[in-house]
Each structure stands twice: as C-alpha cells, then as structure tokens.
Image (spheres, helix red, strand yellow):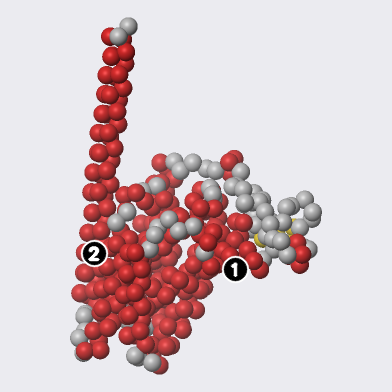
C-alpha cells in the first residue's frame, strides 16, 4: 500500500497547536461544568464519582493515543488525513463505548462478584502494559488481518476516500475472485479507520471496569467516559508532537490500572477505598509520571546538545590539524 499523496499534507503550525490546546481546554471545562451540574442535581458523592471516572478514562486515553500514533506512523497516514480518521473514529468509539458500558453495568448489577474478575483483569493489563513492546507492527494485528481478508480493498490510497468504485481503473489488493468482482472497494484509509475503532474494544476491556470501580451508575459511567473521549482528537495532535516528553506516562497509567484493580479486589476482605482518595492517588501518579517524563526528556535533550557541541568541536580540531599539515 502506498502513502497518501504528499500534497495532502498540512504542516503542524504554531497556530494549529494553539488551536488544539484551546479545544482541549474547552472540553476539560465542559467536563468540569458537567461535574458541577451533577453536584447540584444528583449530589456531592455522584460528583466525586464523575471526577474519578473522568480522571481514570483521561489517563487511560493517553496510552491509547500512543497506540493511535503508532498506527498512523506504520500506515504512513499524513496529518491532514489523521484529522478525518480520528473524527470518524471517535464517533464510532462513542457508540461502541455505550454498548460496553451498558453490558458492564448490567453484569455488575446482576453478578456483583464479577467486579473481582474485572479487578484481576486490570492488574494483568497493567503488567502487560509495562512488558509490551511499543514497536509492534499494526500490520500484524488481528483486526488488520481480519478486515483485509474479508473486505474488498484497493491496493493504494485514493486521496482521502474511504470507499472507491471498482471500475477497473483501481488496483485491487485482495486475491479472492469474489473480492475482486465487488462493485465497491474500501481503501487502506478505511482499514485504518476500522482498526482504530475496533481497537477501542481492547481499550474498553481496561477502561470500563476501571470506571466501574468508582460507580455503577450508568449515567455517571457513560458521561465521564464521553467527556474524556471528546477531547481525544485535540489531545492526540498535542501528544503527536510532544510524545518524546511523555515517554514514562505509560508506566504511570499502568500503576493507575494496578491500583484500581487492587482497589476492586480488596473489597473481598471488606476493605473499601473512598473515591476521593482514589482521585488523589490517580492525580499524584499521573502528575508524577508526567514530571519524570519531562525531566528525562530535558536531560536527554541536554545530552544530545552536548554531544552535538562536542562533535562540532572535534570537526573544528580536525580542520585545524588538516591546515597545520599543509
């Protein structure tokens, strides 16, 4: 598959970065407004549950965005096309997340012991998050292989289209005759969109149980998830150009997952961690991981700058020596 044409690429300017920050702040403000409304209409305890669920989902979303970034880089999707894919992907995520939350809340309300299974799954996910290799090739992923096998697909990208008519002028990627004879073909960009959307199934396995550790109220669980998801598009384009400064946030998210899992499991022994305590712990872990990431990135930048200075000094010495020998 070929990359999208270079002329579709739009450089990430300073103004665009400022615009993304403003929209991210807007969605955070909207989440705060929702929390205040919940405080007055449903009560303080529900507002705390909402804040806890929102923080958990927001922290987990950071790690999900790194996965999205890896997918876009692997498939050679330029920034302009990423906007289009993420817009549709977030819409699909909102629908899928509602399905998972309804199922999750129903299961927990009917079988309370399933919370302990969710807790164990979160701890396992935390361990896998730390051990997993960040350089996995999305082309080897389950969803990519599934979609490319069952969907008739064009060999190349066609501008920024998701579908293209099979009129004989477009090269077909699939080998099966029944796929080649299809009147319409999905483009590789559509495959990327489907991989993004259905990857949320894997993300939901972590995020939904984690939020259920705060509350089983369907409205609180879904609203906290949605407000965190609505800011994903802006957060992605901020992290895309600053991901080197957040290299250790992944480990902070893993600790948050482990903490949430332990919180759910100790309920077996009658031990309960108040949600306001959970909020403080999550904030401390997330802020600490961000600070460590930024400090390490700063030290690495200083080291690289020093190495560059030493390299330039060495070249100057070599030039001086060359002139001395003349």
Q: Position of residue 62 (x, y in %)?
A: 37, 61
Residue denoted by label 2: 285
Furthest residue toward front: 325
**The C terminus - image quarter:** top left
Q: Residue at x 29, y 56 (%)?
A: 248
CA neighbours of label 1 inside 10 A, class few (<14), some (14 to 19), many (20+) = few
SS label for mark 2 = helix
Classify residue 54 as left or right of residue 284: right
Q: How many marks?
A: 2
Residue 58 is situated, as x and y percent measured from the top left of the image, at 35, 65
Extreme residue toward the bottom, this view: 110
Question: Residue 43: image x %, image y %?
Answer: 28, 81
Residue 51 visible from this viewpoint: no
Q: Residue at x 43, y 65 (%)?
A: 229
- The furthest residue to the top: 326
Front residue of 37 and 290: 290
Relative side of 279 to 60, left or right: left
Camera sees residue 99: yes
Residue 65 spot, x, y in % from top left: 42, 59
Which mark sits nearer the N-terminus, 2 or 1?
1
Report which residue position mark 1 lands on.
Answer: 146
- Quarter-of-image position of residue 6: top right
* Above/below status of 115 relative to 280: below
Label 1's element? helix
Name the quadrant containing residue 309: top left
Towards the viewer: 128 or 271 = 128
CA distance for labels 2 and 1: 37 Å
Which residue appears at 27% of the width and 83% of the height?
A: 265
């Amino acid at each position: 598959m070929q990359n999208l044409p270079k002329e579709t690429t739009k450089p990430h300017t300073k103004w665009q970065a400022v615009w993304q920050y403003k929209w991210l702040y807007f969605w955070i403000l909207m989440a705060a407004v929702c929390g205040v409304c919940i405080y007055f209409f449903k009560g303080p305890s529900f507002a705390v549950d909402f804040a806890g669920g929102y923080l958990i989902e927001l922290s987990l979303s950071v790690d999900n965005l790194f996965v999205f970034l890896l997918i876009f880089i692997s498939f050679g999707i330029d920034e302009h096309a990423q906007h289009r894919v993420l817009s549709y992907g977030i819409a699909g995520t909102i629908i899928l997340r509602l399905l998972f939350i309804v199922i999750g809340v129903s299961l927990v309300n009917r079988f309370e012991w399933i919370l302990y299974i969710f807790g164990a799954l979160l701890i396992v996910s935390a361990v896998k998050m730390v051990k997993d290799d960040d350089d996995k090739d999305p082309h080897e992923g389950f969803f990519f292989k599934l979609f490319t096998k069952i969907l008739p697909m064009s060999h190349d990208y066609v501008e920024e289209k998701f579908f293209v008519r099979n009129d004989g002028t477009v090269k077909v990627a699939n080998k099966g005759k029944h796929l080649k004879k299809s009147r319409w073909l999905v483009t590789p960009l559509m495959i990327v969109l489907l991989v993004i959307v259905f990857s949320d199934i894997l993300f939901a396995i972590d995020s939904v149980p984690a939020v259920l550790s705060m509350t089983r109220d369907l409205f609180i669980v879904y609203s906290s998830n949605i407000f965190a998801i609505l800011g994903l598009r802006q957060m992605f384009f901020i992290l895309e150009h600053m991901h080197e400064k957040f290299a250790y946030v992944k480990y902070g998210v893993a600790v948050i997952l482990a903490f949430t899992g332990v919180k759910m499991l100790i309920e077996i022994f009658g031990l309960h961690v108040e949600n306001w305590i959970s909020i403080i712990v999550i904030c401390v872990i997330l802020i600490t991981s961000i600070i460590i990431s930024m400090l390490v990135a700063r030290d690495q930048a200083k080291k690289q700058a020093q190495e560059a200075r030493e390299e330039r000094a060495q070249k100057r010495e070599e030039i001086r020596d060359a002139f001395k020998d003349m």
